Image (spheres, rainbow, N blue to C red):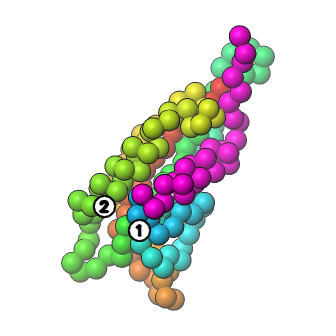
Amino acid sequence: MERVSYTKSLDVVTQYIVDLLTANQVNLSLHGIYYGSRTIIAHFPVVVVDPQNAPKERHATGNIFRRTFTVYIWIAHDRMTQDRSGRTKSNIQLAESVVALLETDYSAGGLLVDSFVQNSEPVLGVISAARQREMVVGTRLTWIGESVA
């Protein structure tokens, strides 16, 4: 039986998510997909894929480790205004579409044993747009991936 080789890299799983979202950017009606923090956003909605951590623990003998990758997927829906201070139905539907896409392949293209979106929560963020700071209505998805390598 051939041994499956899973990834040890937070960068590799983050890039997988960026590539998956980029390939589906038009279907999701997103204006941009970014790897890592972004403070300047011109058009909405966009997604920022932000790698967080990758702790490991011994899994078996022979220096095998279970790694748990955490990646935040920030969906910046739109600027906050007096009339808009929270997520709309369409914002929640977009977040759910992103979750469904991420969970179409729990192995993340064979990189992982398992992956899933652990949480979806409303967030408010501050960005720079046209040289001023503005509040943005968003969603933060917490994606978890597990590897044994």
Label 2 with label 1: CB-CB less than 8 Å: yes
- For the question of whether residue 49 can be seen, the reply is no
Looking at this view, name the residue that lies furthest to the right. Answer: 62
Disc 1 residue type (three-letter): Pro
Q: Is residue 77 above or below residue 71?
A: below
Residue under the image location 42 percent in, 57 percent down: 27
Which mark is on residue 45?
A: 1
Q: Amino acid at mark 2?
A: Asn
On the rendered image, what quadrant is the N terminus found in? top right
- Report the magenta residues as a range: 1-27
Residue 52 lies, in percent from the top left, at 58, 50
First in residue order: circle 2 vs circle 1: 1
Position of residue 70 measured from the top left corner of the image (x, y, whole percent): 55, 43
Left or right position of 43 against 71: left
Does 31 sit left or right of 69 as displayed? left
The mark found on residue 132 in the picture is none
Let me know if residue 130 is in the magenta part.
Answer: no
Check disc 2: other Cα within 10 Å, few if <14, some if 14-19, many if 20+: many
Front residue of 127/45: it is: 45
